[in-house]
Image (spheres, rainbow, N blue to C red):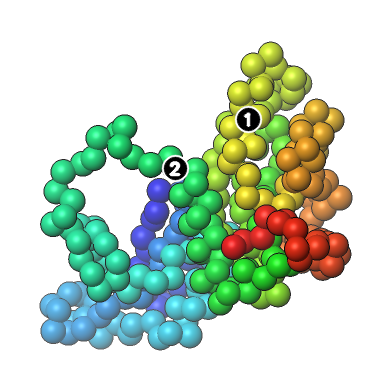
Amino acid sequence: MKINSVLIPGINDSGMADVSHVLRASGAFIHNIMPLIARPEHGTVFGLNGQPEPDAETLAATRSRCGEVMPQMTHCHQCRADAIGMLGEDRSQQFTQLPAPESLPAWLPILHQRAQLHASIATRGESEADDACLVAVASSRGDVIDCHFGHTDRFSIYSLSAAGMVLVNERFTPKYCQGREECEPQDNAARFAAILELLADVKAVFCVRIGHTPWQMLEQEGIEPCVDGAWRPVSEVLPAWWQQRRGSWPAALPHKGVA
């Protein structure tokens, strides 16, 4: 679910990060913050009252603050709910009928592909380097590693590269544990298989705790479980981990880089 917000200087610019926190907790996966268009010729209240529009610096700073909370959509300039296609290429008339469900492509490969593309755009290609990677974080708010692997219902996916740490998307997941004490349910195999498929493109998973069985199964898939950063800010743990690991990945071998 994508949520649109219109940035209005002096009205909601200082509280937009709080809005991102609420949206993330409500299940939204991307926040689209657009600048107010307040032109007198449009006849709107803001335009007629001389409400200033946000400049590029204010918009970028707001998106940057909110990007620490949840993924941001940054290429939209004006919202059209009825538009389909690429920017500058409206293809709405080609999709007047919904496709049959059985004709739709598998969604996981598309999810992974979009993560790669988002990371590449956000890092200006740095995510395509041999030492770049994606990692997953079990976090309730996105800023601190504070969730047990088996209890989290979502993973924040970050790109780590020479361009720094970039939040790419959030992925909702079935809980591996069904209760606070039930971490080895009889039917956990299917749930864990779904989690592995969801995280197939990441190099590591950061969480507060993780059981011995899922730890081993992640390692078998080439995913490193990390608990040393428990209860610490994501912005501190992830860059430090990447700096330590980047030199250990042979360039000739695939290591689940972003591209």
Amino acid type assigned to the residue bearing label 1 in the image: Ala
Can you say which quadrant of the picture contains the C terminus? bottom right
Q: Position of residue 164 (x, y in %)?
A: 68, 72
Query: How many neighbours does mark 2 have within 10 angstroms: few (below 14), some (14-19), or many (20 or more)?
Result: few
Pick out the residue farthest to the top: 186
Please name the residue shown 56% across and 65% down the image: 119
When the figure is inspected, residue 37 is found, relative to residue 16, above or below; the finding is below
Front residue (pair 137, 25): 137
When the figure is inspected, residue 48 is found, relative to residue 236, above or below; the finding is below
Q: Secondary structure at mark 2?
A: helix
Q: Which residue is mark 2?
A: 107
Q: Position of residue 21 (x, y in %)?
A: 54, 55
| Quadrant of res 222 | top right
Dot label at residue 184 = none
Please name the residue shown 37% across and 63% down the image: 5
Q: Which residue is mark 1?
A: 193
Q: Position of residue 132 (x, y in %)?
A: 69, 65
| Residue 177 left/right relative to 32 | right
